[in-house]
Amino acid sequence: MARGVNKAIIVGNLGRDPEVRYSASGSAIANVTVATTDSWKDRQSGERQERTEWHRVVFFNRLAEIAGEYLKKGSQVYIEGRIQTRKWGDKDGNDRWTTEIVANEMQMLGSRGGGEMQDAPAQNYGGGQSRGAASSANDSDFDDDIPF
């Protein structure tokens, strides 16, 4: 039986500064909201239409610390993760549900929110080596067979 695929990729802008907190065990947790905007041309009127979707994103551990340090309201980011729905209780004891993206990769793309992003390292943050670094390391093995 085939397993499912749960992968979300978004590129958008932060709606507010990250909220960073620490669990009882000391692990960093950061929450952000990211806006993505779709646009299309209306068939009947010919006018350009837009729709903005807001996505809740949660970062853990070192990725949460990096998000808290470098991301600001308006920052443009690329995020990869999985979609997760979880249940929680509000202050009145009612069950509530929320759906969010649990990020495992994050790339800072620009400085739309201000100049502070310009000092941030322009690199991929996530669960391991960036794809570019991994492929360039493997490509050197093939160079030996090329006659020129």
Image (cartoon, rainbow, N blue to C red):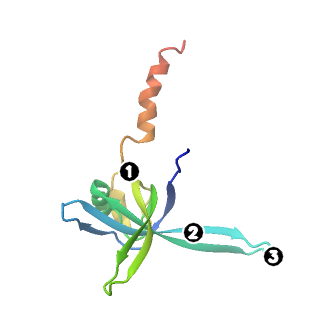
- Which label's residue is closer to the chain start, 1 or 2? 2
* Circle 1 crowding by C-alpha within 10 Å: few under 14, some 14–19, many from 20: few
* Circle 2 crowding by C-alpha within 10 Å: few under 14, some 14–19, many from 20: few
- Residue type of the residue flagged with mark 2: Thr
Of residues 102 and 42, the one nearer the viewer is: 102
Of residues 62 and 37, the one nearer the viewer is: 62
Residue furthest to the left in view is 25
Q: Are marks 1 and 2 in contact (CB under 8 Å)?
A: no
**Where residue 29 sits in the image (x, y, percent)?**
29, 63
- Residue type of the residue flagged with mark 3: Gln
Q: Which residue is mark 2?
A: 37
Q: CA distance from mark 3 to mark 2?
A: 21 Å
- Which label's residue is closer to the chain start, 3 or 1? 3
Classify residue 51 as left or right of residue 7: right
In the structure shown, which secondary structural element does the residue marked by tag 2 occupy?
Answer: strand
In the structure shown, which secondary structural element does the residue marked by tag 1 occupy?
Answer: loop
Point out which mark residue 122 bears. 1
Residue furthest to the bottom in view is 92
